[in-house]
Amino acid sequence: MIPREAIERAIEGGWKWTQGGNTDLTSWVFDKYEGAQWQEIALDATFWQALGKALEWGVDKRDEGGVYKPSYRAYAEVFYDLILTKGDTEAFWRDLLKANDK
C-alpha cells in the first residue's frame, strides 16, 4: 500500500492522477483513498516523478551495478522489489518520508 502522506506529497509535486489520459482524478483519490488503487498508482511514473520533485530527490541515483538512472525510477524499483519479495513496504515508506521531512 502507498500511505496517504506519500500521495499528498506527490500532489504537492504536481501529480495528477488520470485514467484514460483525460480525467483528473487527483482530488477523488485524495479524498476517498483507501488503498484499493495503490497498484495503479505505484505503476504511474508521473506519481514517482512528482513525489521525487516534492521530496527533492535530485536527478540521478546509482544502482547496485553502478548504472545511473533517474531517482524516481530507482525508488520505484526498490518499492517494486519489496512487493515481489514480500519485504517491508511500510518501513520503506516510513524511512523515505522521514528522511525527506522538512
Image (cartoon, rainbow, N blue to C red):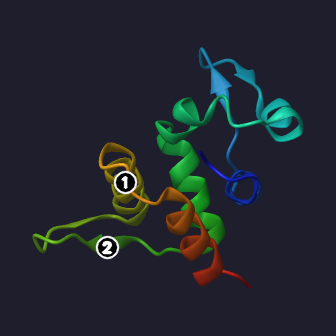
Give the residue type at disc 1.
Answer: Leu
The quarter of the rendered structure image containing the C terminus is: bottom right
Report how far apart the C-alphas of labels 1 and 2 lie in the structure.
Answer: 18 Å
Circle 1 or circle 2, nearest the eye: 1
Tell me where residue 30 sits by quadrant. top right
Tell me where residue 26 sits by quadrant. top right
Residue 15 drawn above or below residue 61: above
Q: Furthest-left residue in view? A: 65
Q: Furthest-right residue in view? A: 31
Tell me where residue 59 sits by quadrant. bottom left
Q: Which residue is mark 2?
A: 61
| Left or right of 26 on screen, residue 91 | left
| Left or right of 87 on screen, residue 39 | right
**Residue drawn 54% across and 30% down?**
40
Give the residue type at disc 2.
Answer: Lys
Count neighbours of disc 2 (C-alpha within 10 A) and say few if under 14, some if 14 to 19, many if 20 or more.
some
Tag 1 secondary structure: helix
Q: Which mark is residue 99?
A: none
Q: Position of residue 99 (x, y in %)?
A: 58, 83
**Residue drawn 34% across and 71% down?**
60
**Residue drawn 67% across and 57% down?**
6
The quarter of the rendered structure image containing the N terminus is: top right
Q: Which mark is residue 82?
A: 1
| Left or right of 91 on screen, residue 67 | left
Which one is in front, 45 or 37?
37
| Left or right of 73 on screen, residue 23 | right
Tag 2 secondary structure: strand
Q: Position of residue 43 (x, y in %)?
A: 46, 36
Residue 44 drawn above or below residue 6: above
Q: Position of residue 73 (x, y in %)?
A: 37, 55
